[in-house]
Amino acid sequence: GRCWLDGRWLPLAQARVSVLDRGFLFGDGVYEVIPVYGGRPLRLEQHLDRLEASLGHIRLANPLPRARWRELLAEAVHEGGGGDLALYLQVTRGPAPRRDHAFPAEPRPTVLVLPSPLADAGALRARGAVVVTLPDIRWRWCHVKAITLLANVLARQQAAELGADEALLVRDGLVSEGSASNVFVVADGVVRTPPKGEHMLPGITRDLVLELLREAGLPCREEPLPAARLAGAEEIWISSSTRELLPVVRLDGRPVGDGRPGPLFARAWALYDAYREAVRRG
Ligand code: PLP
């Protein structure tokens, strides 16, 4: 495969970044992951809006105008051979003359675009995800999609070692999100998800799921999610661009509901699936 790095498409084996790149030295950069169905990106403008917001938070000027991003991502779809893809894009503050925490006077951002096949989450969806709760040890700006993901990496690894597919992160008694997903809980027949804020990434999939539920007239609420509420939940779901929507069937070693994907999940997934197929058809 090939990736786009600093202005051109290159075979992956030839793509090189300086050891002085601030992405490498400091994790000083932001990223996006955009799902593509049948060669068509899902919610492209929302992803580019969030990239713009992330760049704003880290005070890095967007290196490319919106029209160029659209063009470049269309090239990436072509490079990836069309079909179902995940487009990874990353912007770092680029190489600096020396390792200094403060910004270089004139940053030259490093831009990477990397298409790869979208892994099918169907089997995991059918079986249902296993999750564990873990303390959220991340910094306070979790709304920024920063490449600095050490706490997320440690949480996901700990989950894997416990035989789980995802970690749900708990801060001050509240569930913020997963290590790489947003979270929904069904209690008293109402779908609940934490409101946006600095404690979590504003997931594009989360927004889409909420939108689809509301359009279908299903009751949902954006409200803080006490961790204590998880144990009695009727259903738990997680959402992300690559895994779409998944039912959670085990939490901290105990079944969620009757231990099988719930009825509201089935409805939400049918809505999501229909939306995805509409994207595919164009
Ligand atoms: N929360 C975190 C920490 C993530 O890394 C992600 C993305 O994988 C999400 C939530 C879900 O966001 P999106 O639906 O935009 O992929």
Image (cartoon, helix red, strand yellow):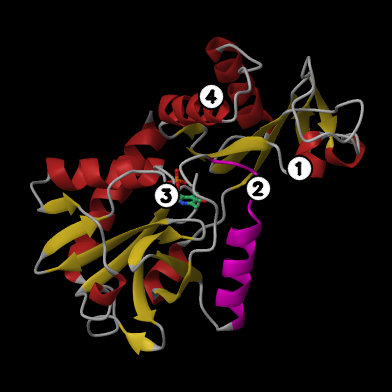
Which quadrant is the C terminus positioned in?
top left
- Against 46, residue 253 (above or below) is below
Q: Callout 4, which amino acid? A: Gly
Q: Are marks 2 and 1 in contact (CB under 8 Å)?
A: yes
Q: Where is residue 168 in the image (x, y as percent from the top left)?
A: 43, 67
Residue 3 is left or right of residue 144, and the answer is: right
Residue drawn at (26%, 62%) of the image? 225
- Magenta span: 145-161
Residue 280 x/y as whole percent: 41, 36
Spatial separation of the CA atoms under disc 2 and disc 3? 14 Å
Image position, residue 2 (x, y; %) = 78, 35
Q: Classify 252 as above or below 278.
A: below
Any magenta on residue 93?
A: no
According to the picture, the residue beneath numbered tag 4 turns out to be: 56
Query: Going 28% across and 56% down the picture, which residue do you hit?
Result: 269
Q: How crowded is mark 4: few (under 14 residues within 10 Å), some or many (20 or more)?
A: few
Q: Hey, what amino acid is under mark 1?
A: Phe
The residues bearing labels 4 and 2 have C-alpha atoms spaced at a distance of 16 Å
Mark pair 4, 3: CA separation: 17 Å
Quadrant into which the N terminus falls? top right
Find the distance from the CA under tag 2 to the CA under tag 1.
8 Å
Give left or right: position of 240 versus 21: left
What residue does disc 3 label?
A: 200
Residue 155 horizontal/vertical position (percent): 57, 68
Residue beneath label 2, please? 148
Q: In which quarter of the image is residue 3?
A: top right
Circle on res. 26: 1
